Image (cartoon, helix red, strand yellow):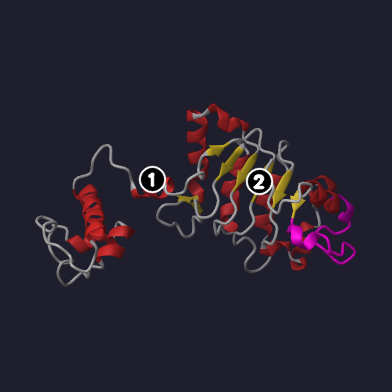
């Protein structure tokens, strides 16, 4: 028979509130009969919340909301279409290399968006896909490329504040990024500040053509005014195309514009 500790490990809220140990009470109590005792170390409200979550584990309801769904509901405006923006930023998606509770793994993102498309025709009209601030890694770029390919009206893809480009320069990362930039509908791909925008990656960008530099945004707005385009940069000889791209992207003077 499962113990209370074993069940608690499946839910981070229960584990945090009840703080049980595997070999001492109440963690080593069998599931049957563990709910009546009161826990003086937590508030009345938190005790009820923890017990309610425990009941969902012991007696799953067909209508019970998963912890992941509870987490998403606590993120108003994210994970849904807001006008022409699909906001999946700031922890809504986690790296497939390190899946996190309450977040969609990058490898499952295409399936998630396909479900949105099936249930809401307006998703086909989104023009901005925001995936910034998710701690995504090099290996996740392939999954993002798959998502952009099924969004026919997407004009801007926002990827800043992730963990792309850590470690040695990686040609496979840029190959997947290029698939995003090459999408016909896409006008801008915002990777400002990501590690692979450093000059030590310039060699791997050497086969990028002018039309790609007309889409890739790699400088934050605060750096743009004083940026010396004559210095060595990842855009190489396409500094004019790249500068024009940045000026179009930041035309509204917003630091992270939507389209």
* Residue 61 as seen in the image, left or right of residue 122: left
User: In the rendered image, which quarter is residue 63 located in?
Assistant: top left
Residue located farthest toward the bottom when viewing the structure as drawn = 24
Q: Residue at x 51, y 29 (%)?
A: 120
- Observer-nearest of 91 and 117: 91
Position of residue 187 measured from the top left corner of the image (x, y, whole percent): 74, 41
**Which numbered disc covers residue 235?**
none
Position of residue 111 measured from the top left corner of the image (x, y, whole percent): 49, 39
Other residues around mark 2 within 10 Å, as few (<14) / some (14–19) / many (≥20): many
Q: Secondary structure at mark 2?
A: strand
Position of residue 202 measured from the top left corner of the image (x, y, whole percent): 78, 63
* Residue 147 as seen in the image, left or right of residue 252: left
* Residue 24 as seen in the image, left or right of residue 73: left
Residue located farthest toward the left when viewing the structure as drawn = 33
Residue denoted by label 1: 69
Q: Nearer the viewer, mark 2 or mark 1?
A: 1
214 magenta-colored: no
Other residues around mark 1 within 10 Å, as few (<14) / some (14–19) / many (≥20): few
Residue denoted by label 2: 157
The stretch in magenta equals 218-241
Q: Quadrant of the C terminus?
A: top right
Residue located farthest toward the top when viewing the structure as drawn = 121
* Residue 219 shows in the view: no
Position of residue 222 measured from the top left corner of the image (x, y, whole percent): 75, 61
- Observer-nearest of 174 and 31: 31
Q: Residue at x 48, y 45 (%)?
A: 76
235 magenta-colored: yes
User: In the rendered image, which quarter is residue 134 located in?
Assistant: bottom right
Q: Secondary structure at mark 1?
A: helix
Q: Count up the numbered dots.
A: 2
* Residue 48 as seen in the image, left or right of residue 188: left
């Amino acid at each position: 028979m499962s113990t209370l500790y074993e069940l608690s490990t499946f839910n981070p809220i229960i584990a945090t509130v009840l703080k049980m140990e595997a070999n001492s009470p109440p963690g080593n109590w069998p599931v049957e009969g563990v709910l009546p005792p009161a826990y003086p170390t937590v508030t009345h409200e938190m005790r009820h919340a923890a017990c309610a979550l425990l009941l969902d584990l012991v007696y799953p309801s067909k209508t019970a909301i998963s912890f992941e769904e509870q987490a998403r509901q606590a993120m108003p405006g994210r994970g849904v279409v807001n006008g022409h923006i699909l906001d999946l930023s700031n922890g809504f998606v986690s790296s497939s290399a390190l899946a996190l509770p309450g977040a969609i793994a990058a490898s499952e993102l295409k399936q998630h968006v396909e479900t949105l498309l099936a249930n809401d025709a307006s998703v086909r009209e989104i023009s901005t896909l925001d995936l910034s601030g998710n701690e995504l890694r090099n290996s996740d770029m392939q999954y993002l490329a798959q998502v952009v390919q099924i969004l026919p009206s997407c004009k801007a893809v926002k990827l800043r504040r992730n963990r792309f480009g850590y470690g040695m320069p990686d040609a496979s990362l840029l190959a997947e990024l290029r698939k995003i930039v090459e999408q016909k509908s896409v006008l801008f791909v915002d990777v400002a500040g990501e590690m692979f925008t450093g000059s030590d990656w310039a060699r791997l960008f050497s086969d990028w053509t002018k039309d790609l530099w007309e889409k890739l945004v790699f400088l934050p707005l605060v750096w743009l005014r004083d940026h010396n385009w004559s210095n060595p940069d990842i855009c190489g000889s396409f500094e004019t195309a790249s500068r024009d791209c940045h000026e179009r992207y930041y035309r509204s003077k917003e630091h992270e514009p939507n389209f």
